[in-house]
Amino acid sequence: MRKLATVFAMLLCVVFSAMAQNRTVKGTVKNEKGDPIAFATITEAGTKNATNADENGNFSISIKPNGKVTASATGYNSNTVAAGADFLTIVITTSANELAEVVVSTALGVKKQPRELGYSVARIDNKEITQATPVNVQNGLTGKVSGLNIATVNNGVFADTRITLRGIRSLTGNNQPLLVLDGSPIALGQLNNLNPNDVEDITILKGASAASLYGPDGVNGVIFVKTKRGSKTGAPVVTVSNSTQFESVLFLPKFQTQFGAGSSVDANGVGVYTPYENQQYGDAYDGQMREIGKPLPGNIPQMETYSYKKKGRLNFFETGTTIQNDVSFSAKDFYLSAQDANIKGTLGGDKNRRTTFRFNGGKEYGRFKANYNVSYTRGQYEVASNSPYWEVFNTAGHIDLAKYKNWRTDEAASPNHYFNEYYQNPYFIKDRARSTGNSEDFFAQLELSMKITNWMNVVYRASNTLSNSSYKNTAEAFTFSQYAKTVTQKNNASNDIFASVSDGSANSSRITSDLFLNANKEFGVFSLDGLVGQSFRQVTSKSIGISGSNLIIPTLFNVANRTGLPGVSEGNSKTRLMGVFGKVTVGYKNWAFLEFTGRNDWDSRLPSNNRSFFYPGGSASVVLSDAFPAIKSNVISYLKVRASVSKSGNVNLGAYELQPAYSVAGGFPYGSLPGFTGPNTVTDPQLLPEFVNSKEAGIEINLLRNRINFEFTAYFQNNTNQVLDVNTSQATGFSRATVNAADFDNKGLEFDLRLTPLVKIGQVNIDLKINYALQDSKVNSVYRGLDEITGGNANYAIVGYPAFMFKLTDYLRDDQGRIIVNATNGYPSLDPNIKLFGRTLPKHIIGINPNVSWKGLNLAVTADYRGGHQVYHGIGPDMDFTGSSARSGSNGRQRFIVPNSVYFDGTKFVENTSVLTANGGYGFYEATANNRGINSNYLTSASAWKIREIVLSYRLPDVLLRKTRVVKNATIALTARNMFTFLPESNQWTDPEFANTTGNFAGVNNTNQLPPNRLYGFNVVLGF
Amino acid sequence: MKKQNLIIYAVALVLTATGCKKDFFDINDNPNQPVEANITPDLAIAAQLTASAARNSGNYAFLNRWLGYWSASGSFSRSTVEMSYNITNSSFNGIWNGVYYTVNQYKAMEKNAEALDWKFYQGIAKIMQAHEMAILVDMYGNIPYSEAWNLSEYIRPKYDNGEDVYKALFGELDAAIALLKAAAQDPKIGTVDIMFNGNKTNWLKFANTLKLRLLIHCSATTTFNVAAEISKITAEGSGFLGNGISASVQPKYAADQGNPYYRTHLFAQNGNEADTYNRANLFALDLMKSLLDERYKRFYREAANLPGQFRGTTYGQNPEDDLNSSRTSGPGYGLMPTVESPMWVMTGVEAMFLQTEAMIRGWLPGDAKAMYQNSVRRSFVSLGVPDATVEADTYLAGINARVAWPDAGSVDQKLAVMAWQKYFALNGIQPNETWVDIRRLKVVAPPLSVAPERGSNPVPIRLLYPQAEYNFNSENVEAQGSISQFTSKVFWHK
């Protein structure tokens, strides 16, 4: 690092010496008719120094003494003039090929003009991604692209996210898109290893049509990340930045605030206080001093006021920090960067550090061109192995948890005397068992291209991602004192806690290569663009793990230091995929385009006779505003319609899954006695690939000289031959079977509206971008004789319904839907037939991105909404179990009449206005059969509005910076993430985005997800 | 020249595309785990026998508590589900899932053995399947059987009458006996048969005892022609388990790979108590103490912090400090003396009580009183009571109606005393058989839970079908009608 710093320092000296005095030039921008061009972009030629004209085309820019000025605007050819005079009139002419300067990366990194595409792509540039200095790319994308759903399923120092584009195409397999980095497909998980500041732009290929050349991997869409390749002008630029953000708990579940510890009732049904109870079904708070737990040694009672402590649980969480330091140097075809991101979580002691280096370069030698990218990411983390969240939210309300932090030194906090006899001190839980790990990810890519003729070139691209990771999980010993064993009679004190350790490492390699020939030629009014190529991918991985318990020397965490047998495991995997593909695009007069694609794949995971599969596709686009120039007016600047039809093959199967694999049975081998046991799941040995048949159509329209951009897409995908895990009756001998089954439709609408600017009042510029996606699906069939399946988490795919629907337990109800209660004790009961509830995936996703700028000040906001689905709160019954939930105190622990209930009077159901529950506290809420086991009690709407990002930035005036003679540009910003979340009243528990999985069966949370957090801080960027 | 270039590139592409050999993609053989073709029956049998035995250590604790053997220590809050008997479709699914899984493993082993003509293994597989499936009928009544374990044809297997399943199991046992008799002695069977070390006679005894168990279960029904079945058993000639021969597995349990019962209910490898929840139930403990039955010191162990004291708890009571786990008695050394002891599948003691009942009923010839007394003596011996035979004889000389043999009594009186002694003998060992006897003979009435949530519920007479059946096999399970754990009887329960 020191060496690197020296290099940068030297580079800085070079740059600074080039600085000189500037001058201000004013002027106006007009078109060939003499009309002013509103909001044209004015750039000092050859620099990044730029400004915008106002609505009357007037501008003012500070440039070098002999600098030139370039004026440009969408739909016009740019014009560069020498700035001889102090007032310039720059004329720019209407472009014959509007939007020509915009190119997007399509499959294989082939650059295209948007007009040629028969499918939807979205491009997001670095500024939009990094505006709120997200620590990873996926956070920076959230809310900004229609159809892209990024769900952050947990808090903490790792970003567990689930990413889907346009809903789902597989019921039980992968639905997450492919990540392509500078043209090479890599594992989606590598998104976590990318420095967001290295990203030049991201193109989202939303549909299978756009990504069909990527074969099976592209069926869920593609996130195409292009990293920076050097400064645009070739001038050397050094950028240094720091982002510091603080993280705190946004909200905790709703608690009851009236009752303290206890788990029994007196003769009158009133809760009885038990000083050492974990459950909170005691009597009401009275503000008096009470003894908690058992006395400390020396018979010293532990005392606490018996009143609700508002922050008693909240204070367990700390203020986390995320600090990112960045430095980069770019010049022509040269980009070098380093980033250090340091995260400390709200769970004290949790930390994760990511250090990234990147070097991108390129060189042209006549008809040859070489590009090379190398990046290295090192991750280091330490986190609590076990979530203490259960113990936190289930601590009685009169306890101030923060008092129990120092369990090693503080007698009251020590496991020997901790007041709670049944639950351990959460500080002890998080400190005792720790997980540490390191990861190293090395990505290298080489791209060679050669121009064969001026209309044909060949490209070879190879990449390798090497990942190495290791972990060590340790758990400390704790030996209970004699006092704990005999005097306080601590529950389980006779069971000393022994030290244990597990250690392991994994490595993987992903090699990809693409070779393709690209030809591009015009024949009169026709243009022909053809591509033929081959791609190959091999993924190998290996993991080894060892573990030992009962460590002899409790502080030495090494597997060799143990009694008993060690646990050992080994896993190996290798898969290969090869594809051959071709594409041909015919253009007519640059306003009509027709494209055909085809690809054949060979996949090692499939049975040899089903291994090869082919699928074709086609798309068309017509720029109506060019085809019929009459359409073009001052109102309509651009109008395009497009459509595509394609088929894509997919393989949702792991390596080696075709044959039932036996495992060593638990305990075996006993000496030389072997014992193998078969799988509880079975796979059809003659599986076929899945196919996704996609259709999409869309319209793109630009209005008022491109101030208003509107894009609309409708898509429909029929997914057949699904490789599916079908849950079965255990009486079949198996709990699940993997078969080709199910057919379902995935469909939706996408709207993107960009108003740039929405309003311009003087120098105040307000932009607004809105995107909306409607995502829906319908299951057509499941499997012979089956009309529904589930993969867990109460998510069901049911014929005739969207995937997925919640099916959960509910109350036994009469035919009018009223809850049937017992005529004697007033208790409801559980219906063994589970019932259908709402969908588990959002139906509506809205993103709103307003941006307000005034001179150097800029305010950017990202808000989003997801709705139309439901969430099951696994922590709901957990909180009712201990009685910490607001729900369990909702009737003051008094006997009550179950709302909307009936009872059976011997002949018929009569409305219940008289039968009170036998108990209104512990006896009711803790019970499974009439409360906790009834899932529908904890199912709520999952809709939420979130203000994801708020960024207020200020770009220091150049005048000011000129005096420093060092700094070329400087921006300071206040940043905030997840500042506000708006939830429906019924959701008393947590962020509905949180889930216990990043898999398909979403919408269920549990105690392993910490409470939601907000981040706020500042960001300083200096350019030299 | 340019054309030539083009051709070269095109050829190169085609070569890379097709140049790979066909076996380039044949890399899908599992390098991590064996597959079915690798697993000959000798590699599977020990694992499956161990799994069958482990059901006695892992699945029946709730029955020990329901039936008055065990109870919860005062360290835990009341279970409002189990202690109220308001069980749900999610309660105790492990038995159902475990049995269907294990039987599927026996079926795979049987199929492989048939292909290899390893008759010994085929016979063992059939006996063990019968053993497993009878347990399931006893707990659930009607269950999938004829369409079970045939996923490719029946993804949703229908339910068969429990009675039909019982009859089918007799056919399986007859077939097993024939296979065993015809089997050549296998060289490996002596080591991999961890139940009887390849002793054919003992397997035949086990098969006969299983038949007797099922006949006894059906004592109140006309399912079987008892005389004909008994004469088949007699004709076979190997007799029954008992007199020191139990069906137990011994894979060579050791400290590192301990007996599952010992590791679940006595002590963990690090020396900690493995089970701080289950404690002596005051019902059985007080009864034994009052009958001067020394076995209570073997069924239970001394309270950890109160040396010499055997203390129990009442099922369903509130947590109480004085009754916490270190002040009450957990499962004892008589059940599992050491971590290296064998683990029973079916005990010889139970087999002797089965023979006693058959003699009382006149199904088997012989002196019922002698068989009864020998059964009790064997219980004392197998539990490791010091001076077992002397203690047993003293005990048998008692005059209490739960012990003394009614020489002049009716069949029912004799059955009653047998039922009480079988109840005592199976404490913590085979509560599933006790549950059958309680329902069938109606002699022993287990104590009711004192949990207030119980209301007026009686002890359940069956389990509820797993939730997964309602989810994935709904029309077949729903065809069984509404099931109540209090009123829906198993077919032999009259």
Image (cartoon, coloured by chain):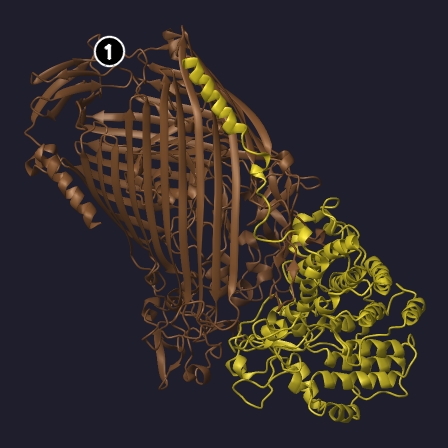
Q: Colour of chain B?
A: yellow
Q: Locate residue A409, reporting x and y percent.
A: 31, 75
Q: Locate residue B20, reporting x and y percent.
A: 54, 33
Q: Is residue A455 visible to the viewer in this orientation of the structure? A: yes
What residue sits 73% from the left and 92% below the top? Answer: B391
Q: Chain A is drawn in which colour?
A: brown
Quick check: A130 left or right of B106?
Answer: left
Q: Is residue A623 visible to the viewer in this orientation of the structure? A: no
Quick check: B216 left or right of B231?
Answer: left
Structural crowding at the residue carrying mark 1, measured as other residues with C-alpha within 10 Å and reported as few (<14), some (14–19) or many (≥20): some
Q: Mark 1 points at which residue?
A: A93
Task: Please name the amino acid that badge 1 sits on.
Answer: Thr
Quick check: A444 left or right of A730?
Answer: left
Chain assignment, label 1: A
Q: Locate residue B37, reporting x and y percent.
A: 68, 51
Closest to the observer, A283 or B89: B89
Viewport quadrant of the C terminus of chain B: bottom right
